[in-house]
Every structure is written in C-alpha cells, then in structure tokens.
Image (cartoon, rainbow, N blue to C red):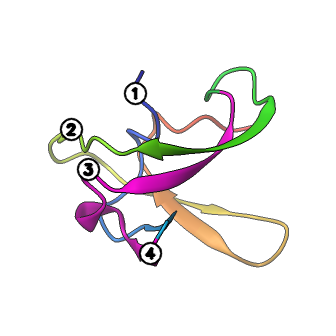
Amino acid sequence: NEYAVCLTGDTKILTDSGYIPITKCNNKYVLSYFNNDLDLIINETWQKCKLIDNGIKDIYQINMYNNQSINATKDHFQF
C-alpha cells in the first residue's frame, strides 16, 4: 500500500527516532495513525516507510483549524 504520496519533501514525519523530514524516512519506522487514507479508521501502528518519487507537481497550502498548515499536491485527500 502507498500512503502520503501527496506530501512535500520538507514535511516532518514522526518516526521511532523522533520527527524528521519525509525525505529521510526511507526504510525507517513511521507512525501510521489511520488504517488507510480512505476510510480513516484510527489504528496506530509503526510501519516501515518506502519513499515514492512522484516528480515535480503544483503545491497547495492546506490551512487547518489549529492554525497549522501542510503543503501537499492536489492528490491529498481533503475533508
């Protein structure tokens, strides 16, 4: 399964070693909070990360209610 294929390389991801940029997560264990990206059933597990290069795409800033934001491609699932 492929998840988070829509995030920019500077996105920080929680690993078993702390937060690091997603570009440095290959083959590390990262916290997966949901069962998958579609049904969003909470199921916290540590999954081995496999990076996928999707090339260069347009980036959009998604602002959240807690005043934080993420940068993602149009492929990012939005509620």
Q: Residue drawn at (25%, 63%), measured in percent from left and top? A: 23
Quadrant containing the C terminus in the rendered view:
top right
Tell me which label, 3 or 1, sits earlier in the chain. Answer: 1
Q: Which of marks 4 and 1 is nearer the N terminus?
A: 1
Amino acid type at image mark 4: Ser
What residue sits right under mark 3 in the picture?
27
Disc 3/disc 4 C-alpha distance (Å): 12 Å
Mark 3 vs mark 2, foreground winner is: 3
Q: Mark 2 points at which residue?
A: 54
Comparing labels 1 and 2, the label whose residue is closer to the camera: 1
Report how far apart the C-alphas of labels 1 and 2 lie in the structure: 12 Å
In this view of the protein, which residue sits in the foreground, 17 or 5? 17
> Which comes before the other along the chain, label 4 or label 2?
4
Q: Is residue 58 left or right of residue 17?
A: left
Residues packed near mark 2 inside 10 Å, few (<14), some (14 to 19) or many (20 plus): few
Q: Name the residue under label 4.
A: 17
Q: To which quarter of the image does residue 10 belong?
A: bottom left
Q: How far apart are marks 3 and 2 (CA)?
A: 18 Å
Q: What stretch is highlighted in magenta?
A: 17-35
Q: Nearer the viewer, mark 4 or mark 2?
A: 4
| Element on which disc 4 rests | loop
Left or right placement of residue 66 versus residue 69 in this view: right
The mark found on residue 62 in the picture is none
Alpha carbon distance from label 4 to label 1: 22 Å
Q: Splitting the image into 4 quarters, where does residue 57 fall?
A: top left
Residue 47 against residue 19 in the figure, above or below: above
Which of the two discs, 1 and 2, labels the residue nearer the N terminus? 1
Residues at circles 3 and 1 in contact by the CB criterion of under 8 Å = no
Pinpoint residue 56: horizontal percent, then vertical percent: 17, 48
Q: Name the residue under label 1.
A: 2
The N terminus - image quarter: top left
